[in-house]
Every structure is written in structure tokens, then in C-alpha cells.
Amino acid sequence: MLLISLIGLATLGAHEIRDALDLQIRPDNEQQVHRGIMIGAVAYIGLLAMPFVPGAEIGIALLAGFGAAIAPLIYVCTVTAMMLAFVVGRFLPMGGLERLLRLVRMRRAADLVARAATLPQEKRLEMLLEGQPPRLLRLALRYRYLALAIALNTPGNSLLGGGGGIMMIAGLSGLFTPLATFVSVVLAVAPVPFAVAFLGLRF
């Protein structure tokens, strides 16, 4: 209930910030607009990095209000939010995840996490590939950076926790190196800001 309440409050906050960004630029409110953009950018990073919170709505509101001029800022903020979630996941203790899984009676998943926690990165991948899992799973694990990029751009990924949740799990898994993950994220989040900046796409 606490987690649901937190997600609900964060979602409400995202909607309020989105509505507050409906600003009209005039000579007498330029400072207010600039301040609103900065607050929106910071809120966008924080909320987008949180699992299950629709922080992307703030980015869309900024793109809708300011168009191509704001696209580079949205791009940088999106990459920052995704990597922030990834770094948080890297430092989350796997023991905590194991206890959470046991608490909700997902014993097999908890056993898998406990087993993976004692293994180095390359051994974790071997462990997940053993036992002849379905072909699609094997491909997803072997080409995991491509799979990560696709997951970030898949409609409905909020069911998996949204971009923030996906990146947090990626960091927690220990299967993704920071540099390769950064490159994957840089390429994965580029389409929408680039389309706004160079093709004139409007929301």
C-alpha cells in the first residue's frame, strides 16, 4: 500500500507539473518561463527514473509547448534519467530483492536471485542460459543490449515498470556494463527528440 501510494502521489505530481508547463512566452514572463523549464527538466529526470511513474508526460508537455528548441534538453534529460535509474539499480542489494520475492511467495524467483547474487557477471549469464530455455529468451539474453533498447521503446512498457523500472532492473541484474548500457540508451531514446528537432514533429 505504501508503494502504491508513493506511485500515485508521484503520478499526480507529474500531471500537476505537466499542466503548470502550459506557459505562453511573452516579454514580461521570460524569467518565469525559463524557471518553469528548469523545474520541469529536473522533475522530468527524477520522475522518469522512478519505476511505474509516467514522467514522460512532462517531457511531452515540454516538447508540445516549446517544440524543436527544447528537444536537445529533453534528450539529455532522458538519457540522464535512464542512467540514474541504472546506477541506482547497480547499488541496490540483491539480498533485499530476494527478501521481497520471498515475502510475496515467489520462491523460485527468490532462489534464482540468491543463486545469481554469488556469481560474477559472466557466470550469471551462463546460469540464465543453462537448461535450454525458449529460443526467444536465449536471443534476448545474448543480444541483451538490443533487447534493452527495444524494451525502452516498446509501447506499454509501463507494465514492466516503465523506462525507470526497466533500467533499474538492468542495473540490479549485473548483466549490463555501464559504458555499453550508456551507448544503448543514447541510441534508444534518440528517435523522438531527433524527430522533433529535425523533422518538425509536433505533439
Image: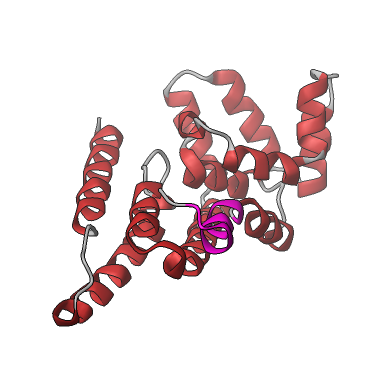
Q: Residue at x 62, y 33 (%)?
A: 113
Number of disc labels = 0
- Asked whether the viewer can see residue 117, the reply is no
Front-most of residues 11 and 51: 11
Q: Position of residue 28 (x, y in %)?
A: 14, 81
Judge by depth and name the residue closer to the eye, 69 or 44.
69
Compared with residue 130, is residue 13 higher up or lower down, i.e. above or below?
below
> Which quadrant of the figure contains the N terminus?
top left
Magenta span: predominant SS is helix
Residue 5 x, y percent position in the rendering? 23, 36
Give left or right: position of 179 versus 78.
right
What colour scheme has been applied to the protein in the rendered image?
secondary structure
Q: Residue furthest left?
A: 28
- Does the magenta run of residues contain 47? no
Front residue of 42/130: it is 42
Q: Which residues are magenta?
A: 190-201
User: Which residue shows up at 25% across the image and 37% down it?
Assistant: 8
- Residue occupying image coordinates x 25% and y 36%: 2
Residue 167, relative to residue 22: is it above or below?
above
Q: Position of residue 152 (x, y in %)?
A: 58, 42
Decide whether residue 193 is among the magenta residues. yes
Q: Report the residue at 19% width, 81% height from top.
A: 27
| Residue nearest the viewer, comparing 116 with 140 | 140
Seen as rendered, the residue at the extreme front is 200
Say left or right for 164 vs 38. Answer: right
Residue 103 vs 186, above or below: the answer is above
Q: Position of residue 133 (x, y in %)?
A: 80, 19
Residue 79 appearing in the image: yes
> Image height check: is 169 above or below 84?
above
